[in-house]
Image: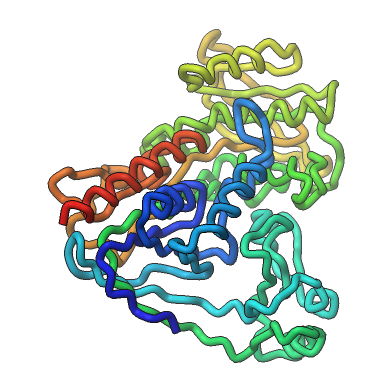
Amino acid sequence: MVETQANSQSILVVGGGISGVTAALEAAEAGYDVVLIEKNPYLGGRVAQFYHYFPKLCPPTCGLEINFRRLKQNPRVRFFTMAELVKVSGEPGNYDVTIKLSPRYVNEKCTCCGKCAEVCEAEIDNPFNFGMDKIKAAYLPHEFAFPMRYVLDPSIIGTDEAKKCQEACEYGAIDLDMQESTFDLKVGAIIWAAGWNPYDASKIEYYGFGQYKNVITNVMMERLASPNGPTGGKIVRPSDGKEVKNVAFIQCAGSRDENHLPYCSGICCLASMKHATYIREQYPDCEVTIFFIDIRALDRLEDFYVKVEQDEKVHFVKSKIAYITEDEETGNLTVEGENTRTGEQIRMTFDMVVLATGMVPNKMNGVAPPEVIYDDYGFILLDPEKAGIYGAGCTRRPTDVATCVQDATAAALKAIQSIARR
């Protein structure tokens, strides 16, 4: 149980991704007490699942590592993983909040020796890799996880598998008696940095996601290319593990569509171009075709677009693909649509198709006070007349990592200003 804080000058940050971690650090380093909560068993959010950032194409681990070191060194930040905000009441400057902690079944004594995983035979779908592979039910979320501590999946609690894990641990780190718990806090301001989820591609029935194994999403491609991903960084077809020779990217998969996401997520075009560079690096002879409605590559990011477009193996075709079908024997995929520049009908076959799905913001469902307002798409709006709760990063608008960092810094400043004036 965590003791209740009676300090209304403290700040609660909900979400431990790049936006939440940035906001927490900026507020703490300005001299304010911060509580950071994250529902996953690790900090880092979606960024931890990336292979590279654009446009420089550098790995995210270096940036995250620096921020994690800052967290360790700052006593003003307390963070909790597997934690969710379940209740908010009060008013700006004096909020009462309730946090729910889900059991990890592994305590602070864990040394990451991995012996619990060695004896565990039960497996689960790997959430970090979007279910593209299996992991033991006693697992480390990923190799750069922070905190670096194992987790026991609830599915084995009460079984012999859990007991084997406990018996294998030499350090007394497996605690099978852990229970769900709650604690209360009093805070002066709240930063909602809960991030986003990829749009559910299975809802776009005419593209066959979930039905055709070689139709994947952009976030799955990111994991395929990652050295700690399901294939060790090798981009291969999910159906048979074969190397790819001809890959299609379908932009606005569900986006800019009143039946799905009516808005543009802004970063999907650049993400697909980044993925095209992943493929071209691994397979110099592979052909890549990007089917797009419009290309979004603004300001300095246009140079990245120009660089990719100059690759003779990357083809840009202006088209809204109508549907995808599969050859059951080969697993190859045929896409059909219309080239909207020439009016010609498109019918092309590919080894694999990648759907560029958009960002869906995580809302304050069930806990939002009346002063929290959203736009028509579910993104938090800032009302200067209703201070106290502030969105940060992709809860405010679809955006890239660099902009999320800037936006989180601004949210931290707004939170500080709102409580400093009281």
User: How has the structure been colored for display?
Assistant: rainbow
Q: Indicate the quadrant containing the C terminus: top left, top right, bottom left or bottom right.
A: bottom left
Image: 415 above or below 348:
below
Q: Indicate the quadrant containing the N terminus: top left, top right, bottom left or bottom right.
A: bottom left
Q: State the residue lying farthest toward the top.
A: 342
Lateral position of residue 188 relative to residue 360, left or right? left
The residue shown at (75%, 63%) is 134
Residue 240, position in %: x, y?
84, 47
Lateral position of residue 4 relative to residue 246, left or right? left
Whether residue 372 is visible, yes or no, is yes
The residue shown at (77%, 34%) is 351
Count of numbered marks: 0
Closer-to-camera residue (93/191): 93
Q: Quadrant of residue 73?
A: bottom right
Lateral position of residue 246 relative to residue 87, left or right? right
Whether residue 216 is visible, yes or no, is no
Residue 385, position in %: x, y?
13, 46
Residue 380, position in %: x, y?
30, 47
Image: 99 above or below 418:
below
Residue 318, position in %: x, y?
55, 17
Image: 302 above or below 258:
above
Q: Quadrant of residue 237?
A: top right
The residue shown at (33%, 48%) is 391
The residue shown at (67%, 69%) is 149
Closer-to-camera residue (47/294): 47
Closer-to-camera residue (320/377): 377
